[in-house]
Amino acid sequence: MSGRGRGQGRGRNDERQQRGGRGNYRGGGRGGSEGRGGYQSRGGGGRNRGGGRGDGGRGRGRGPDLSDLNKVLTNNIPVELGKNFSFYLYSVQCHDKDGKEVEQRHVRFNLFNIGVWDDLLVDMPREEKEDLKRVVFFQGSFFFAGRAIPGLERENLPVELSRGNDTEGNTMTVVGVQHFGPPQEVASSAPQGTARDELTVDTFRCQQCNRTFSAEYHMKQHCSQTGHSPVYTPVRLDGPGNVPEFMAYLNVALQRAMKERLNQWGDAFIDPNAQNATEAKDRQGNYLGVRIYEAFFASFDLTRSPQAHKANLVLTVDLRAKILRTVTLYDVLKDVPRNKQVAAKKTWIGQRVMYNREKKGYDLVDLDFEHSPRTLPIPGKDISHFEYFARKGITLQYPDASPMIVLNGRKNQRIFLPPELVSGTELEPRVREMLPQIASYGPEKRYGAIQKMKEFLKPGAQTTRRREGLLPALGIILKEGRDVVRARVLRVPEMIAAGVPIPKDKGEMWAPFVSKANFKVEPTRATVFNVVVVHNRRVTQRDANKVYVNIKNLVNSFKAPFRFGDNKPTFVEAGDGAQHSGAIERHFSGQMPPNLFVLDFLKPAGKTDPEYSVVKMVLARGGYLSQFVNFKTYAHDDPRDERKSTIILQGVARQVLQKAGVQLWWVKIPRSLKLPAIFVGADVFHSPFAYNPNTKKRERKKSCAAIVVQIIREYDRCDRVEIYSKTHQRDGGQEFNLGDVFKSTIQEALRTFKVNPASAIVWRDGIDDASLSTIALAEARGVREGLEGVVTGQAKSRASTSLAYIVAQKRIANKFFAVKPGYGDGDLGAPPGTLVEDMQRMEKTTFYINGRAPPYSTSKPVRYVVVQKDEGIAVPIPQLTWEQCFAYPNWTGPIKVPNVLMLSHKLAELAGGFRDSGNTINTRLATKLHYL
């Protein structure tokens, strides 16, 4: 497999554009077709060297052949624990004056600070107290410490910290302490009980302060001058810690260490001293109104090789892009006349905005046009907001500008900010479209971030306020080098398009071969659709008919079991917004003919139609298949390029047939898998939080779970789609406990298609590591119960169906870089299909598959965790998973996850956008791919 790639375009769910792309490893990119999907990457092309123009290579140049790749470099830094590594875990209880438990974390934190630092340790010298504060980490119901806290020894507990001095009568009590070493599962030099005159040889640390030293001589000199003592290997521990507590301690310490050097922004950090922010521009050099910051992400993790019993500790480092709008609310609202102020409030109230100084998001709850920073006083203080910010060292450029921005703070407290310090978080459509180009980082940039992060965290590299590195002070040492692991590139599967084999060297994009597919079904034997064409009023009926004829000819050219007839379609004219959905509801309120198919020719005022989800909901409720074509994205009624219009409409024609049930291409199934089989995909869509002006809280609507079951009966060819899909409404944010959902959906699918499967492969998205041994196994039992249900009149035995249940984890920070002679570390990203099995999790079999190479960025792998695999499943799960990435009907190229998992994502996303979260989708659509 070479570094050559193809770009992908962005479009609506149903319409596809063609747009060239540039890839991730050396070699040029060539434009692809199709559009945007939930997990799809954009691919192709090269960086640095390679064919084409300039240094980056946008042409058709071919990069190095990476098909024989046998190892990859990771973005993991090896970590070593000192022989004297240990940590303390203190348990606390917090009650109010009535003896009830206090649950608010900020109240607990305040009690902790007062009780420990202002009461228990009130007499401790200031510098010593500040040093101790660095290694104490409050977590709510407990707190970690890197060394023992005076006064909280086990024999003194319980210790009441606040003694009711809190104004509301709350108290906090430390009730227990445990002193742990590393977990048994972690490869380390466990404490053995060193004598007091013997110093550990891995690191020299001070017991009373957070100083570390490179040599024993310097350690002893420091102790002699200060009266301090070294950190000895502890003689007595309460035992090894468990993995969750150990990892929680390491990562909270890492967050503290990064905060001492960097500015936090969400879950990432930016360097306050580096000039690493760039003003984004479009291809014409025009500013886009956003500033891009390089942000570092890091977390500790445990990995092991397949043969090892112990796990190795690593620090995973990645580079992310943080985006800040340069247009502030001052720029937007400074000239709003009085008669437009109500409209401005309707526009902005409820939106999420950012306080630019702190990089924090808030809900905007009001615009105070009656005040400015100079005229609005601080509640309870005799100063204005202008004076308040001046005292904080912030000089306002527009102290007399209104409105003041009113934000919703903690416990619904109001925060007033000057408009020049606040920006909206919603990006313009054209900026969102360009994000892959302006906010992505290639392999070289990401690899360089690893070294930068190491400079921040290793001892002596940088100091802040006379402080040395926190991690070494805790016995956490970053080693030199990077983790290199074994890898291999998986082969492209065998694919058939209507009986015609697709060449394996076309495995990156096979649209030209699919367009030649011929199912050889006579027109008189095909099902004829009754077509309704809904067209925007800015698209004339004449132009709409012209485009319809083009689509009809493309659909019928496949000679498939479904076709568009020769009769003229029914035309429905629609307006914008509510006039669009209203026209749809009026037309389809009456009796409709059978075999109906709806073509909706959009031409919204903006990039997208805000009524899209409403229209799709109305059509789904009626059980009508539909296909949308966005004339705003590309004007098919007046095309500047007939060839481009044809390419887009070819994609439309393919989707029409696939929604009807035609399998345009087929990925061959390995014969080691017992048939018949079912492939199951599951995903849950969660709507984002939104501010509710009635309840004055951030709330989210119901979540939507989608289960997709595909029936597999043949190894070599199948021209008919056998899919059963169903959605299930969930409480907002509820991701887990789909056991009953799996059971009912699988039983309905098996009854519908009258099949008794010999094998079942489930790919589940959205389960984290902490839930693999509980939630995932419970859901796997639900799948098993569904397979054991009554099917075709006979009860199935427990052993009749072999099951594999695999969890897909996409939101991971891991990256892989190809290791190839003649190229430097980090020069090449690993190619699509790179399989890594040498980074196992603690308990479950794990593998990674690298996704498609996106332009301007670095390929992102997906982690797959095999939660359950019966002995009857003989097929190699990684190979089957990769091959099913070629089966997604909405894209003629490989995607990042298996077909059924992507289908479940698309269905959950579509139905989750409905007002009823998909509750009213007509059961007639259960066996159709209506959600493509």
Image (tube, helix red, strand yellow):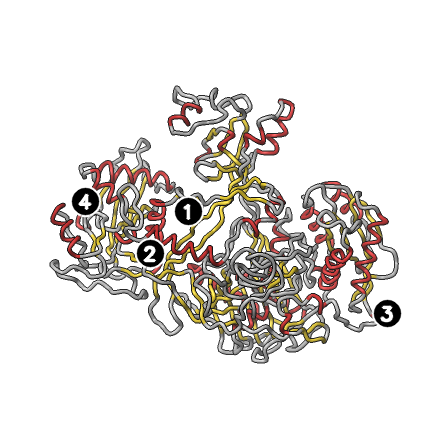
* Label at residue 151: 4
Q: What x and y, as percent, mark residue 204?
A: 20, 56
Mark 3 residue type: Thr
Numbered marks: total: 4
- In the picture, the disc for residue 245 is 2
Mark 2 vs 1, N-terminal side = 2
Please tell me whether mark 2 or mark 1 is closer to you in this view. Answer: 1
Q: Is residue 124 above or below residue 774?
A: above
How far apart marks 4 and 2 lie (CA) works out to: 23 Å
For the residues labelled 1 and 3, the Cα–Cα distance comes to 65 Å
How far separated are the C-alphas under marks 4 and 3? Answer: 90 Å
Residue 914 percent location from the top left of the image: 64, 48
Near mark 1 (Cα within 10 A), the count class, few <14, some 14-19 or many ≥20, is many
Q: What label does residue 524 carry, if any? A: 3
* 826 displayed left or right of 875: left
Q: Secondary structure at mark 4?
A: loop
Q: Which numbered mark, 1 or 3, is in the foreground of this view?
A: 1
User: Dot 2: within a 10 Å radius of its alpha carbon, few (fewer than 14), some, or many (20 or more) residues?
Assistant: some
Numbered disc 1: secondary structure: strand
Q: Earlier in the sequence, mark 4 or mark 3?
A: 4
Amino acid type, label 1: Phe
Instruction: Kindly tell me whether residue 759 is visible in this rendering.
Output: yes
Contact (Cβ within 8 Å) of mark 4 with mark 1: no
Q: Earlier in the sequence, mark 1 or mark 3?
A: 1
Which residue is disc 1 drawn over?
Answer: 269
Q: Earlier in the sequence, mark 4 or mark 2?
A: 4
Q: Amino acid at mark 4?
A: Gly
Against 353, is 800 above or below? below
For the residue marked with disc 2, what is the amino acid?
A: Glu
Q: Residue furthest front?
A: 54
CA–CA distance between discs 3 and 2?
69 Å
